[in-house]
Image: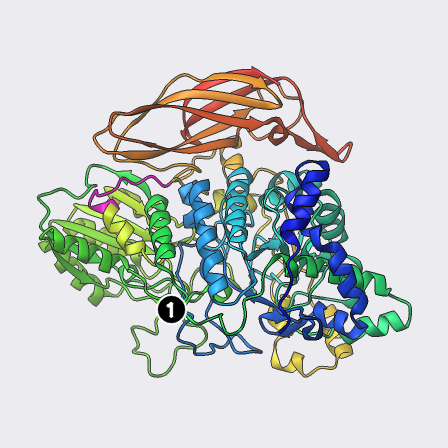
Amino acid sequence: MKKLVLFLASAVLVASACNGPVSPQDRLTANDQKINELIAQMTLEEKVNMLHSKTNMSSAGVERLGIADMNYADGPFGIREEGQPHSFQSAGWTLDSATYFPTGSALAATWSEELAYKYGTGMGKEARLRGKDVILGPAVNIQRLPVGGRTYEYLSEDPILSAALSLQYTLGVQDKGTAVCIKHFAVNNQETNRGSVDAQLDERTLREIYLKPFERAIIEGGAMSVMPAYNKVNGDYCSENEHLLNEILRGEWGFKGFTVSDWGGTHSTMGAMLHGLNVQMTGSNYLGQPVIDSIATGALTEDLVDEKVRQILRVRMAIEAVPADVANTVQTSQPESQQIALEVARKSIVLLKNMGLLPIAKDVKKIAVIGQNAVLKTQSGGMGAGVKALYEVTPLEGICKRAAELGIEVKYAPGYKTIAFRWGPAPANLDPLEARSNDEPADPALVAEAVALAKEADLVLFFGGTNKSIETEGSDRKNIDLPCGQNELVKALFEANPELVSVLVSGGPTDLRELEPVSPAIVQAWWNGTEGGTALAEVLFGDIVPSGKLPFTFPKKLEDSPAYAMGNFPDPNGAGGDLFSLMFRPDVLKMTPEERQKFLDSLPKPVSKYTERFYVGYRWFDTKEIEPMYPFGYGLSYVYFEYGPITAKVEKETVKISFTLHNDGEYDADEVAQLYVSRPESKVEWPVKELKAFRRVTLNAGETKTVTMEIPLKDLRYWNEGTNAWDLEHGKLQLLLGGSSDDIRETAEVTI
Ligand code: GLC
C-alpha cells in the first residue's frame, strides 16, 4: 500500500509563519491542497464510498490512491474488543484485551484536568496499538436525569466541569495520534425513546448548558470528528440538524473535521447531505447509491460530495494509518495505562459520610465484606462502552490483598444476588437465585448468612449500588432505588453490628434515605476501572486520603430533581415509540423501504421538554432551596482544609483570584477548591449560583499553599435571546469559594 505522505508538519509551519498561531481546527486544513489534488483523481463512486460504512467499525478510503480506510473503536473508557466485520459480535481475538479505565462519572469525580489529559493519552495509545484511527468518545452529554442509562458513561451536570474534562481528554487522545469522535452531539440525555425522542429546549439553555461540553473540545481541543446523537433537537434529527451541524458546529465553531452518525442514526439522503452529515454508520441505504442517483437527477451536486470527502480526508491525513502488519501485534493493555487508571480511580472515590470508622482502625482484625457488588466485575456490559479488560481488581480482591499485608482476616458473603448484566429471559441453566430480577426483595437465606458473618466481625463493609443490567445504554432506570433488597439487608447488618461502612458501586446516584441512617460511613466507589479494587482498599485502609467530589447531585428522592419536578420526564405519551428499538425488529427489517417509512411515520412522536431550562442539577436544587441528599461538588476527606480570604481583581478580560489553602490534618491530601459566582443585582435571570472555576490542590500534612484561579469574562456571558448572540452583563459579581457547592468558605465581590 502506498505510504501516505504527511504534509501536516510543514503546512502548519508555513501557516503559522504567515499569520500567527493556527487554531486547532484550522490545523486540519493544512493539507487541503494535497487533498484537492487527490479528490480530482477520484471517481464519484470512490468519493461516495467514503460516505458510509465499509464494515461495522470502518469507513472506506481509496486503496488505488493510497488512502487508508478509517477504523473506529468504542468506547470512552477502554478500546473495545474487535468485533466481527459486520456485527458487534466478538471476533474472538486474544491481543485485544484493553485497559478498563474508570468510567465517565468516576473521571468526572476527580475534577482533575491533569488526569483527564493522561486518561486521554492512555486511550489514544491503546487505540493505535489496535490499528484504530478514531475513538468513539469522549461521551460528554450533561447529566440531566439521575436515572439516565448512560450516567456512568457521561461526566457531570455542570457544563464548566464537563467542558474542562472533555477538552483535556480530547487533547490527550489526539496528542497520541488518534482522533476523538466526541459524542453524542447533542442534547442526548435519556435512553427512553432515544432513537426518536425530540428534545425541545430554548436557545439559551442549549448554548449555556448542553453544547458547552462539546464547544471547548472542538474549538480549543481541535476535536477531529463528532458523532451526532440519535435523538432530535427542536424537531430535526441530530444527524441532519442544520442548526447544530452547519450553523453552530461548522459556522460558529469553525469545525473542519467530519461527522459520523451514531450506529443506525442516519435518517435520509437529502437531510444528511444538506445538513451536515459526512459518514453514515452503518449501511449505505442513504449515503451510498442514493447520493449518486441524486447527483444524476441534479438534486445534489458533486461539489457537495467533494466538500464532505475533503472534511474526511483532513482527518485521514492528520492521523497516520497503522499498517495492518503492525496493528494488533502486542497486547492492547499497557502498564502505563493501567497506572493511569489506578491514579484516576484513587482520586475519584468520594467519601460521603464518616463518623470515625474510616480510615479502618489499626485494631480491626476481622472484616466482613457483604454484597455481590464487592465481586461483580463492571468492565463489560452496558452495550457500546463495554471493555474486555486484561484484568480487573474487584473491591473484594483489593481489600483481601491489603488486609493480608496487615494481618487482617476477611470473610465474604453475597448478601443479595443480582443479574450480572444479562439481557433477555434468564437462561434455563441459570440457578433460580441467579435468575432473579434486580428489584426483588432480599433473600432471607442470604440475609441470615450475611448477618451471621457481621456478628463475628470487628467491621462490616457493605457493598451496595447498581450493576450493568440496571444502568446501561439503551434504557433508563425506572427509579434510583437500591435494588435486590439492599436496604433491608443493610438495616439487618447494622442491627447485627453498627461498625458498618457502606460502599456504593454504581455509575449514577442512588436513593440513600434508608441506607444513610444505618451507615456510620458511606463511600461512593463508582465503576472504577481495572484497578478500582486496589484504589478502594487504599482509601479504606488509609494509605491514601479520599479526594473525589460529586460531579452531579444525589437527590434525596428522584421527584426532587428538576425534570421530574417539572413533569418533563418520563414523557407520559412517549411509551412504545422508540424508533431505534423498533427499526431492528425482524418484521420491520423485512419491510420494503416504503413500508418501513410508512410504519415509522405511524409511530408516536415522543418529546422531551426541557422547561426546567438551565436549572439543571444544583442550579435547580440551590435556586429552589431543595435540600439534596449530597450536593454537587461534595466530598469529605480525612483532613480539614482551611481557606484564606480571597483577593480578586479583573484584568485582561479575566477575573483573577487568589487565596491560601491550608491542610490542617495529619495526612497528605488533595482538595478540590471550587469557585462559584452569583449575580445579586442582575437584570438577567440566573441560577442562584454557577460553577465557574475549580482547582485540585495537593497539600502535605500541615502545608499551606497560595492558589490562583481565573474566570475568563467570556465564561460569564449569557445567550441573549433578544439579539441571538452571547452577551456580557456588567455589574456586581459575587465570588463564592469552597470545597462544595454547599460549603462556601470565603466570598468576595468584583465589578465586571
Ligand atoms: C451505540 C452508541 C454509541 C456507540 C455506537 C457504536 O449505539 O450510542 O455511543 O459508539 O453505537 O457502538
Magenta region: which residues? Answer: 539-548
Q: Main SS of the magenta segment?
A: loop
Considering depth in this image, is 581 or 294 the residue closer to the camera?
Answer: 294
Helix, strand or loop at mark 1: loop
Amino acid carrying label 1: it is Ser
Q: Which colouring convention does the figure follow?
A: rainbow
Q: Is residue 710 left or right of residue 572?
A: left
Asked if residue 88 is positioned above or below residue 321 in the image, the reply reads below
For mark 1, does the 10 Å Cα neighbourhood hold few (<14), some (14 to 19), or many (20 or more) residues? some
Residue corresponding to mark 1: 437
Residue 133 appears left or right of 15? left
Locate residue 731, reporting x and y percent: 63, 17
Residue lying furthest right? 298
Residue appearing at x 69%, y 44% in the figure: 14
Q: Is residue 146 left or right of residue 248?
A: left
Q: On the rendered image, what quadrant is the N terminus found in?
A: bottom right
Compared with 657, 627 (above or below) is below
Is residue 732 shown left or right of residue 542? Answer: right
Image: 115 above or below 85:
above
What residue is shown at x 75% (from left), y 78% (from top)? Answer: 593
The quarter of the rendered structure image containing the C terminus is: top right
Residue 10 spot, x, y in % from top left: 66, 50
Q: Quadrant of residue 292?
A: bottom right
